[in-house]
Amino acid sequence: MKFVDEFRDPAAARALLKRIEHDAAKLDRPIKIMEICGGHTHTIYRYGLENLLPDNIDLVHGPGCPVCVIPMGRVDDALWLARQDDVMLTTFGDMMRVPGSDESLLQARARGCDVRFVYSPLDALKLAQENPDRKVVYFAVGFETTAPSTAVTLRTAKARGVKNFSVFSNHVTIEPPLRAIADGGETEVDAFIGPGHVATIVGTKAFDFLAEEFNLPVAVAGFEPLDILQSVAMLLEQFVSGQVARGEASVGNQYSRVVTGQGNVAAQRLFDEVFTVRDSFEWRGLGWLPNSGFGISEAYADFDAERIFDVPDDRVADPVACECGSVLTGRIKPWQCKVFGTACTPDTPIGTCMVSPEGACAAYYNFGRIDKAATAALANS
């Protein structure tokens, strides 16, 4: 960003904090704000923003880390693909270390499987063109943010007539998990910091249901410290003004320098062409959610790895010790997991939240947000 310093200005941060403290003092009860995106979580804990907020404002983590929400069974499916003799499996680097039932893709690669990380699905397509004797599979993950690049790659593969390229689609959509959390879930949330990257594609309109159906305020936010603080201030204003009490919660757009109300309409049209919405898809921590994942459409069936290969599609329970599901739904903070920082570290991850660059556990661990006394007490309980 050319002018990044303006979003990290200490004087502006102090002014925003003063505004937040003033409004927080008017609250008649504590409020819990869920930051949906893992990128927000890392900003919050990298800059210590949680320690600057008044005690009656609690930030909790949501299911917005694209790697973290992939269930172990889907990782095992990718490992099965990687073990096929004629397959070259490609994916983003952060998926390489996600644990499956018995190993990760990185460990499978060390054993001789042809697993490669790529920076984009177009890199995977290039590998397919350069290796016509191999079946190149792209293990696609991510919300609506990364889905456009997969869609463009599929359209390109079809236009070029590439026969040895396919996609194992694990793209997911943002509305169903938020609806599950808002609609009587175990987590009580008063407001949301909306995911700026997803909103560039789907627009702020995608979050209107939270305000209209559940009277929950949303502030779609950018990823710098002042973005987060301003979004908190915007949410508080809806409470202290009586807007929420009147049942008039709304969706605010703090990230207006990038996000619009309608989003990227061209990308949305491409979704309709290339993808189909699955009847249901499994999420870590949330189980099976209806209409929450993107499969490959009939028009691109020749590039659908799940149709080309006899993928096992077995469902696998998470390790008993791992509480990634509870972290992803805001029920606990990472340090409240018994294995956090002890058996589970970035070097020896048990769950996805410690692996991904957007995982809440990785944020807590890497930026020193470790309640060591509490962690030791939990480990010994």
Image (cartoon, rainbow, N blue to C red):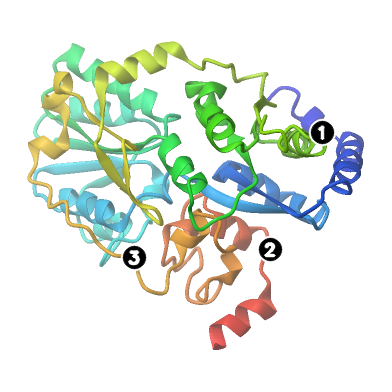
Q: Nearer the viewer, residue 352 or 121?
A: 352
Q: Quadrant of residue 232?
A: top right
Image vertical order of residue 328 relative to residue 337, above or below: above
Going 39% across and 34% down the picture, which residue do you hit? 173
Residue type marked 2: Gly
Q: Which mark is residue 123?
A: none
Real-space Cα distance between discs 3 and 1?
43 Å
The 10 Å Cα crowd at callout 1, few under 14, some 14 to 19, many 20 or more, is: few
Real-space Cα distance between discs 2 and 1?
36 Å
Going 37% across and 28% down the picture, which residue do you hit? 147
- Mark nearer the N terminus (2 vs 1): 1
Residue at mark 1:
241
Q: Secondary structure at mark 2?
A: loop
The answer to whether 191 appears left or right of 282 in the picture is: right
Residue at mark 2:
368
Q: Position of residue 199 (x, y in %)?
A: 53, 26
Q: Which image quarter holds the C terminus?
A: bottom right
Residue at mark 3:
318
- Mark nearer the N terminus (3 vs 2): 3
Real-space Cα distance between discs 3 and 2?
26 Å
Q: Which image quarter holds the N terminus?
A: top right
Q: Secondary structure at mark 1?
A: loop
The 10 Å Cα crowd at callout 2, few under 14, some 14 to 19, many 20 or more, is: few
Q: Is residue 134 something one can see in this rendering?
A: no
Q: Position of residue 180 (x, y in %)?
A: 44, 46
Q: Nearer the viewer, residue 243 or 135?
A: 243
Q: Position of residue 290 (x, y in %)?
A: 31, 40
